[in-house]
Structure formats: C-alpha cells, structure tokens
Image: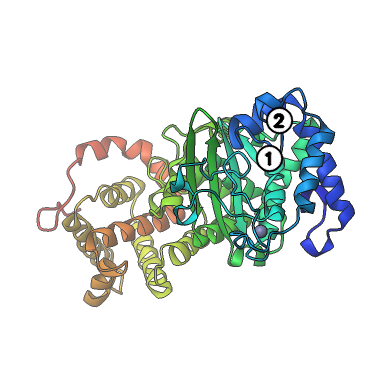
Amino acid sequence: MLLVAGKSSPEELTEEDIGNAIEFASKLYARKEWSSGYIHAMMLPNSGILMANPSMSKKRSPNAIAQNLRALLEEPEDPNAPICEICGRRHSRPKAVYRSDFPLVGTGGVPNYFPSAKDGFNVCSHCLFLAQFLPLVTYKVGRRVLVIHAYPYELMLELHKEAINDVRKSFLASTARDFKRPENFLFHLLGELMRKTERDELWANASIALYYFVNNNQGQELDIIHVPTPVLRFVAHASKKDSQGWRRIVAMGWRKRPSEEEFEKYEKSYANEVYARLLSGESILPYFIDMKDRRANSKWSLLSFYCSEVLGLDKDALEFIKNVGDKIVETLERLPDNQLSRRVRELERTEKLYQFEAFFVNLEKLRQRLGIEKPLMTFDEFATILTSYGEDLNVSWRTVKHLLLFRVYEKLHDRLMKASEEAEEEVEENEEVEIFGMGVEE
Ligand SMILES: [Zn+2]
C-alpha cells in the first residue's frame, strides 16, 4: 500500500490512497498474464477474491475484482468469530480462509498447514484485504516467487521498491533483473542499497528472511532463508568500506573464477559458496585470501570486521595475530625473492599442526641467523597463537594460518609474484615440507 502510494509510513495513508491502490491492482489482476499466469499459477491457486480461478475467466474484469476488494474492507465484523490470528485487533471472518485467498496456508480438510492444526485460517477481512496486494511487490525468480520479509519495515520498502517500479514500467510482475537465485539477488540488492543509503540505523538491528515459494494445484515448494543479523552488518560494512575487496571475495565463491565481464552473468545464474556459507553460519575466512595469486582479497580492516562481528573473535587476539604477522613479514622481507617465496609456501602447505609449529621454529632460527634482536614471540604467546580462536585446536590454528597468510600476502604480494617465476624451479626441488629437526638449514 505504501509503495503504491509512494509514501513512507502507514500513518500517512489516506482513504484516497486505498482507493487508488484497489484500482491499480484490479486493472492488472484482470489481465491474463497476472490472473492465470501468476496469481493462479504461482501464489493463490483458484483465488475467488482476485478471480484467478479459471472458471471465472468470463466474468473477470477490473470492476468485478475491485468490488471484491472493497467488499472485504466493508465486511461487517462478527463478534462471535475468533480474533484475527494476524493482527489480533479484529474478529476474523466467519468463514475460515484457505490457500486460494491467503498464500502458503493449507486447503480445506488438511489441518496440518494451519495454526494449532485447525481447519482453516482465522483472519480478519482487513488483513486478508492487505494480503491481496502481495502479487504487486513479489519478485518472480526462476520458477518461484520471492518475498523478502524484513525488519524494520522501512527496509522491506527499500527491498521491494524495485518490484513495484518494474510493474509500473512493464505492467508485468518483476523478474528481479532475471536473477535465477534468490540469495544472489538479495546480496546484490543489499550491496546497492547499502552503498547509496547513509542510514546506518537501518542495518543495526535489521533482520531479513526470504520466502521463496511456489504454490499451485500441481505442487508446493518453499524455502525459508534467514539472513543472520551479523551477516547483514558485515555486508553493509563491506559494501561501503571495501566494495572492491568484497567483490573479489564473492568471486572466489564460484568454482571457476569469473572475469570482470563475466561477473554479472555468474551473479545472476550460479550458486555461490560464499553466500551459502554466510547464510548457513559457516566461516568464509578462506575466501579472504587467494593462495593461487598469493593475494589478500580485501583490506585488513574488512577482515578484522568480519572476524570480530561475524566469527566473534576477540579483538585483542586479532590485534596480536596481526602483530605476529607483521613480525613474520619483517623477517621474511630480508630474504632474497626465491627464499622468501619458499618460506611462504611452507606456511601455505601446512596441513598438520606439527607442520604449523615447525614453521615458527624454523622462522625463529632464521631470525637468529639474520641477527634480528627480538624473538618472534614468547612461549606463552605461541600457546596463545594456537588457541586464540577458541578451544578447538584444529579449527583454531587453521584460522590463525589464514589470518597470517592474509597479512603476509597483503605486505609482500608484489615480491611474491616477482619471485614466483624464478623460484618455481627451486620450489619443485624442495617439495618436502621442512620439519623441525629434519629441516635443512640455509
Ligand atoms: Zn487482522
């Protein structure tokens, strides 16, 4: 209603706005593309209110649909009927409501898709009236319908504005710029929205759930995708403070890396591992570095924000790991290119904890040989390195390894790239990882 009226808060809506919305929707809903092609086919099968039931095609007209909608608004309340299960303010309609009039509830006689396993949905005529406008703002993504439910509601207006703009332009339901996957579309929209709006308070406690469904006489499918609040805050931060870095991280989420020109095509069509991990609460830390090109994908500040906001890593621990990373850089940058490259490869190839330990012991020996005064770290600090990311040692040291490699790549990328060609042969010869006590001193 707000989007049709171009207003931002419900209090501003007038009776005239409601009349206009009824007229706007009825004209569209009487068209075949909407009626049989969208409403009946995907959302409200056999809808009587919107006259999408195929048997009503002869009587269907903008006027007849508008009359049905107005009748809902004017329907008298039955004081004996139960209270509306949506608003809790008015008595529900005397007759229970089924899926032909309200999306995603059940049909008659099948109580398992209704609250408390009742037969039918108790909803008041006003709430039912509002639900009839849903098709105007949903997105058609692939073969299903996408609704982005968001808190606060201002965010929902922002995320669905595009749908209504598309409807105004083409008189057809929005196809979400031909995105084929709902989460890709959401992340794209969020990025755009975050870059253009200065209203940080929109994201502070935001919450978003995607309802991605199809509901018709042939079958029903539904995915509900929750977007965790820390992830929203991270994407907001990433889009604003380091959008290039964020783009490189996302690009790592496809099995084959897209070129700059291919990015948009990939984004529209293919599942992305980075998005999937963010939505399922798994770490995306490995995607912050590109081991193949020995490059840090983002700024340290974005990595740091991710670690503290999403992974919940302690800020002091992070700062400590960064300092250790700087000391590693300080040591390695004194080596000639090929040796530098080889040492970094040693860290890259650590798969077992003892290899990770050996890297530090060998590095300490190197520092002494190079005459660097202060040790890399104390015994206690070394213990901290191994456990600073939680109790699970196996997760912990691998996380630290990624953070350290990030710092090394960030500072030494150019030299590492320069070294990589000339060092390639030598690396082949030194294939075996140096283990403390077995390593060859340089
Ligand atoms: Zn209600």
Horizontally, residue 203 falls left or right of residue 346, namely right
For label 1, the SS is helix
Horizontally, residue 232 falls left or right of residue 254, namely right
Pick the front one: 105 or 278: 105
Quick check: 166 above or below 321? Answer: above
Most distant residue in the right direction? 16
Quick check: 350 above or below 83? Answer: above
Query: Pointer 1 and pointer 2: residues touching (CB < 8 Å)?
Result: yes
Q: Residue at x 38, y 60 (%)?
A: 329
Give the x, y percent position of residue 192. Answer: 66, 48
**Mark 1 residue's CB less than 8 Å from ligand 1:** no
Quick check: 196 above or below 171? Answer: below
Q: Quadrant of ligand 1?
A: bottom right
Residue that label 1 marks: 135
Q: State how far apart marks 1 and 2 are (Cα).
A: 9 Å
Residue that label 2 marks: 34
Most distant residue in the top direction? 58
Which comes before the other along the chain, label 1 or label 2? Answer: 2
Q: Residue at x 33, y 58 (%)?
A: 399
